[in-house]
Amino acid sequence: MARFVLRRVALLAAVLFAVTFLGFSAMNLLGDPLVNVVGVLAELDCEGIEAGLVEDTTVDAASRDCDTVAAAKAQYHLDQPVPLRYVLWVGDLATGDFGTSFQNDQPVSQVVREKLPETLILLVMAQIVSLGVAVPWGVIAAYRANRAFDRGSTVASFGLLSVPNFALGVVLLYLLALRWQVFPSAYESDNLGGLVYSMVLPALTLGLPLAASYQRLLRTDLITTLQEDFVHMARAKGLPPLRIMFRHALRPSMFSVVTVFGVSTGALIGGSLVVEQIFGIPGIGREIVTAVIRDDFPVVLAIVMLVACTFVVLNFLVDLFYGWLDPRVRAR
Amino acid sequence: MADQAASAGAPLLSVRDLHVRFPTERGTVNAVNGVSFDLYEGKTLAIVGESGSGKSVTAKTLMNLLPRTARVSGEVTYDGKDVRALAAGKVKHFFGVQMTMVFQDPMTSLNPVKKVGEQIAETLRYHLGRSRGEALAEARELLNVVGIPEPARRVSQYPHELSGGLRQRVVIAMALACQPRLLIADEPTTAVDVTVQKHLLDLLDGLRRDRGMSMILITHDLGVAHGRADDVAVMYAGRVVETADARSLFFDMRHPYTEALLRSIPRIDDPVHHRLDPIPGRPPELIDPPDECAFAPRCVYAQADCLGGVPTLSGLVGLHRFACLHPTGTERGMAAMAANRAAGTTAAGLAVTDRGGGGG
C-alpha cells in the first residue's frame, strides 16, 4: 500500500511540474512577458536612455516610465535567467502570490479568494447531485435491466446528455423558478443556507447531464458484475437482492464512474462558465470570461493554473480511491 | 438398491419431470428435458455428463439461480416443501441455511474486493444473527475445519492473495458456515490442479459424513463420482439416460453412453501409449432436437428403432433405470453390436470398426 501511494505521489509531482511549466511557457516563452505586464512601455530602451545614448522622446515622463518597467521586472523576476524565473514563479504561486490584476491593481490572490468559494460550492453541489441521482438510478435500471424502467431511463439519459447546458439551465429556470417558484432565480449570498438554496438550480443544470452519463456507465458495469460467479455465490448464500446489490455488486462496478468523476471535473468547470452567466453567480467562471475579454493576463493565468492543479490533484485522489475500491490495484 | 429401500421415508430432495427452456434468438434451447431424481438425507448423488448435458442448469434450477428468461416447469420439493414456491415467496433463511452451492471456478466465485473472513462471516451474521466479532471468530474456525493453515492471518486477506486450491477451500467454508443439510457442488474441482482435486474431494466427502449432509456432486468425470457417490445419474442432452446406485452403474452399466464415458477415462493400469477411446462426434444440438435417441448419432449400438423416437427411462425411481432400446450387457445390445459390426456402420451412419465397441 505504501509503495502504491508513493508511486502515485511521484506521478502527481511530475504532472504538476508539466502543468506549471506549460503555464510558465505560455507567459514567458511566447512573446516578451514584459509586453504583457507593462504594454508599450516595454519598447522603451531604458538602458539606452540612462546611458544617454538614445534620445528621450517621451519628454518628461521617461524616467518614471523606466521606474515602472524596473519595478515590473523585479516583481515578475524578469531580470533573472529563465530557469530561475520559473523556480521563483512557482515559489510565488505556492505562497499564494499570483501577481496583480491589470484591471484594478488588486492582488490576483484576493480576486481568487472572493470568487473561488462560489464556484467550489457550485461544483461540489453539482457532483453531489449527479452522484445522488445516478447511483440509485443506475442500480434500479441494472436490477431490472431491459424492463420498462430501464428502457425509459435509456431514453431519458440520452435526452439529458444531448441537451446543452444553457438550454437545460433556461428550462429549469423557467419551470422551477418562474412557473412553480420552488427555487430562487437569482443568486443570494446573505447566509450559507440561502446560498446553497439558490445554488440548487445551477447545480442541477450542471449535474443532471453528468448524472445521465454516470447512470449509463454504472448500469452497464453493474449488469456485467451481476453475472459474475461471486454474485451467484452470494445468492446461493441466501443473501437478499438489495444486500447483494449494495454489499457485493456496487463497489466492483464503480470504476468507470470514478474515472469519469475525475475527468468530468474539467468539463464541469467549462460548464460553470455558462451556468454562472445564466444564474448570475459571481464565481471563477464569470471572472475568467471577463479577464480574457479585458486581456487581464495575471488573472487568466492564475485561474488556469488553479483549475489545472485542482484537476490534477483530484485525479490523484481518484487514483488513490481505485486502491480502496479494489485491493488488487494496490498490489500492482 | 437395497440401500435405498432401507432409507425408506421421504427423500430430502425430490425432483420430478423438470424441464428448463431458454428462449434465444436462434430458437428455444431445451436445456433440461424431464429430469427426475430423489436424494435421501445423508446421501451423495453424482450427476455426470459432458458440457451441455444440462447438469449445471439442473443445479442452478434447484438453487433458483437461473436468469429470468428461463422457462421452468416440473416439481422440486425439499423436505416436503415446494422449492420454487419458496424462492418466489422470497423466503428468508432457506438458501444458504438449508441448501447451498459450491461453484466450479474458485477464481471467480469469491468477491475480489472483500476480505475472505468478511465473506464467510456475512452469512453467519445475516442468517444466524451473530455479532461481527462472533462471526469472524467462527469464520476462523471454519477455515481451520477446511484445512487452511494460519486461519487467523487468512481471514483478513483478499481472495487474490490466495491460491486456487485455498480459495476453493474458502468457498467450501463459506458454503458450510450455516450447517446446510444439502450441498450442491457444481464441478468443484474442475478448475484446480489435479494434485489439489483429490484433497478437495476428500475434504468435501469427509465434511459431508461428519455433518450428515446430503450432497449433489456435479461432474463431467465419472472417476470423481467413483467411490464418493451413493447414486449416480448420467445426463445427456438434458435427460437422465441412466441412473442407479454407484455399484450397479460402474459394474453393471446399461447405457452405451455410460459405457463410452467410462472408456474415455485413462486408467493407471493401461499400457504405456495406450490410446484412449474418445466418444465420436459432438454433443447434440439443444435447439429443435430431432425426435430420436439423442445419443444415437454417436452410439456404436444404434439401430433403426433408435431413430424412431426418444427412449424413456425404464423402471421406477430409485431403481436402476436406463433409457436405451439396445442396452449394453444385454442380449439385445450384443445383437445390435454384432449387426453393426457386420454392416461396418450403425443405423445413424457411424462407421464401426473392430476397436469401436464390445458390449459389457
Image (cartoon, helix red, strand yellow):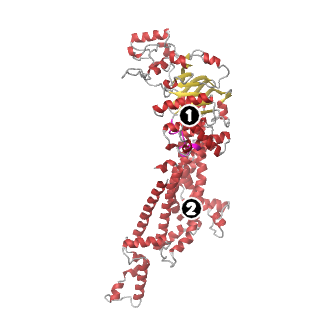
Which region shows up in magenta? Answer: B105-117
The chain identifier of the residue carrying mark 2 reads A
Q: Is disc 1 surrounded by few (<14), some (14 to 19) or many (20+) residues within 10 Å?
A: many
Say which residue label 1 marks: B102
Residue at position x 37%, y 75% in the image: A32
The extreme front residue here reads B150
Counting from the top left corner in percent of width and height, residue A101 is at 49, 76
Q: In which quarter of the image is residue B143?
A: top right
Residue at 49% across / 74% down in the picture?
A: A97
Q: Do the residues labelled 1 and 2 touch (CB within 8 Å)?
A: no
The quadrant of the image that shows the N terminus of chain B is top right
The stretch drawn in magenta includes residue B115: yes
Q: What element carries label 2?
A: helix
Q: Could you tell me the amino acid type at mark 2?
A: Leu
Q: What element carries label 1?
A: strand
Task: Give the amino acid type for the residue marked by disc 1 in the picture.
Answer: Val
Q: Looking at this view, name the residue that lies furthest to the bottom.
A: A60
Expressed as whole percent of the image width and height from the top left, the position of residue B262 reads 47, 20
User: As displayed, is residue B283 above or below residue A290?
Assistant: above
Marks 1 and 2, how far apart at CA: 47 Å
Q: Which mark is residue A123?
A: 2
Q: In the rendered image of this protein, does residue B49 appear above or below residue A296? A: above
Q: Quadrant of residue B14?
A: top right
